[in-house]
Image: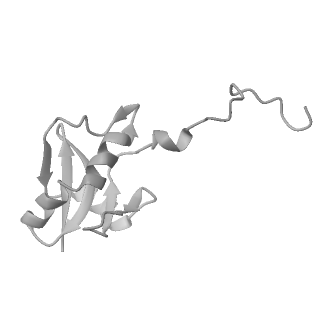
Amino acid sequence: MTVYVAEVSGRGIVAFEAANDAAAATRLTDRTLLRDLRVLQNEGRSLWDGVSQIGLREPSPPELEIWQERPATATASLSDDDRSWRVYLVAVVDPTEFDDDDDDDDYDDGPGD
């Protein structure tokens, strides 16, 4: 397996393994990955706008090091076709994890109030 990097606007976004270039290109069409790239954010912006071309390339030495360390940003792909690791090379936030629907207007007096 070879490590590949998906690149958006000249910036490496996510690293993953694939058997060859064709398999890596196929990973870039995976609905789960594409959805995550549109949902996950870095510095308040989506990783991918849904329109820009996603490039494919070999990792740089620092990116390969991140891949090898597989930090907490590594996620298991849950796609039906592909159950492998992907590692985000930028800090990501999932804004859907912060859905605040408890209707308390974000005000809390604390315990006992």
Q: Nearer the viewer, residue 63 or 112?
A: 112
Which residue shows up at 37% across the image and 41% down it?
39
Residue 22 in percent (x, y) is at 7, 64
Residue 111 in percent (x, y) is at 87, 38
Q: Nearer the viewer, residue 56 or 49?
A: 49
Quarter of the figure with residue 44: top left
By what rule are the colours in the image chosen? one colour
Which residue shows up at 25% across the image and 34% down it?
49
Which residue shows up at 22% across the image and 37% down it?
50
- Left or right? Give the position of 23 relative to 36: left
Which quarter of the image is occupied by the C terminus?
A: top right
Total numbered circles = 0
Residue 65 in percent (x, y) is at 30, 62
Which quarter of the image is occupied by the N terminus?
A: bottom left
Does 104 sit above or below residue 54? above
Which residue shows up at 52% across the image and 44% down it?
97
Residue 41 in percent (x, y) is at 38, 38
Quarter of the figure with residue 51: top left
Quarter of the figure with residue 45: top left
Q: Residue furthest left?
A: 22
Q: Nearer the viewer, residue 79 or 27?
A: 79
- Left or right? Give the position of 30 relative to 105: left
